[in-house]
Image: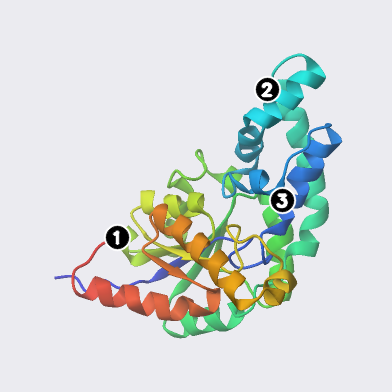
């Protein structure tokens, strides 16, 4: 029998490895819609997080409350022309703010060093397009985080939760099989991507979209409130299909060791 083990880890960016709280997309979507006269709360903006950004914007426009506001202002539902114009503006805003939201989350560089010490290769993908990823990856590299492969959302035919982007990273890393890959993400959409790709999926709670707080806000929370938010985030990630959920990226080496043990007894994703 083939001795399978995890050889490749594929990590998301905002909320998983950088940008604690996944703040950059929320700010850009909120400002884009506000400029168009549309009010939306943060929870609604976060709902489709993990999707390719144009798909995310389309999902927001299809929300009943947003659609109704648009109809009142324009006398019709938002169409493709409106979506194109809004997305063009969103990209301008997003590109402008990304460099300020690219700091690695606590524990990242230590976790990556530990994984690489065992021979694992590190890949990444994102709902960001290539121009956005160039900014984020460059800033992260300055802070010590540089994956072996980076695939952006506009480099595959289908975005998350389809498996295309995870498969492309796996090929770039030379993965021997999907079962030898672990996808790590902070959103249900990203977890579903890994599941659909036939990979192990690991959710991250504290720094992610499902909690949605900055590092300072998270640190200031009373322990009971933090535990409740963490548990809620973990439920959402488990419901999306996560095989494991960890509090922070610092717990990733232990999670990979646990998956190796499951592979060793014949378990598959």
What's the distance in space between the residues labelled 3 and 2, CA to CA? Answer: 22 Å
Dot 3 falls on a residue whose secondary structure is helix
Dot 2 falls on a residue whose secondary structure is helix
- Residue at image location 42% in from the left, 57% down from the top: 171
- Residue at image location 82% in from the left, 38% down from the top: 34
Please name which of the two marks, 3 or 2, marks the residue nearer to the observer: 3
Viewer-proximal residue among 11 and 213: 213
The quarter of the rendered structure image containing the C terminus is bottom left
Query: Picture coordinates of residue 136 (x, y %)?
Result: 71, 61
Viewer-proximal residue among 82 and 228: 228
Instruction: Kindly identify which residue carries mark 3.
Output: 26
Q: Residues within 10 Å of mark 3 (few under 14, many from 20)?
A: many
- Residue at image location 65% in from the left, 76% down from the top: 222
- Label of residue 269 in the image: 1
- Label of residue 80 in the image: 2
- Whether residue 38 is visible here, answered yes or no, is yes
Viewer-proximal residue among 28 and 102: 28
- Whether residue 148 is visible here, answered yes or no, is no
Query: Picture coordinates of residue 248 (x, y %)?
Result: 54, 74
Is 43 drawn above or below residue 10 in the view shown?
A: above
Residue at the farthest top position? 75
Q: Residues within 10 Å of mark 2 (few under 14, many from 20)?
A: few
| N-terminal label among 1 and 3 | 3
């Amino acid at each position: 029998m083939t001795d399978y083990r995890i050889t490749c880890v594929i990590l998301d960016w905002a909320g998983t490895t950088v940008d604690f709280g996944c703040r950059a997309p929320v700010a850009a979507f909120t400002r884009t819609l506000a400029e168009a006269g549309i009010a939306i709360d943060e929870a609604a903006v976060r709902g489709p997080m993990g999707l390719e950004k144009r798909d995310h914007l389309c999902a927001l426009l299809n929300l009943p409350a947003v659609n109704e506001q648009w109809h009142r202002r324009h006398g019709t539902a938002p169409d493709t022309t409106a979506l194109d114009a809004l997305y063009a503006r969103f990209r301008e805003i997003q590109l402008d703010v990304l460099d300020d939201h690219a700091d690695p989350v606590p524990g990242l560089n230590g976790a990556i060093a530990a994984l690489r010490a065992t021979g694992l290769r590190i890949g990444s993908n994102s709902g960001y397009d290539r121009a956005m990823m160039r900014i984020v990856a460059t800033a992260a590299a300055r802070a010590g985080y540089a994956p072996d492969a980076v695939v952006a959302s506009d480099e595959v035919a289908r975005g998350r939760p389809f498996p295309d982007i995870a498969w492309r990273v796996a090929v770039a890393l030379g993965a021997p099989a999907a079962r030898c890959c672990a996808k790590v993400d902070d959103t249900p959409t990203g977890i579903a991507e890994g599941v659909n790709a036939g990979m192990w999926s690991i959710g991250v709670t504290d720094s992610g979209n499902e909690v949605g707080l900055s590092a300072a806000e998270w640190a200031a929370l009373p322990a009971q409130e933090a535990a409740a938010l963490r548990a809620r985030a973990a439920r959402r990630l488990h419901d999306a299909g996560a095989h494991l959920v960890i509090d922070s990226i610092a717990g990733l080496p232990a999670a990979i060791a646990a998956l190796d043990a499951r592979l060793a007894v014949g378990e598959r994703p």
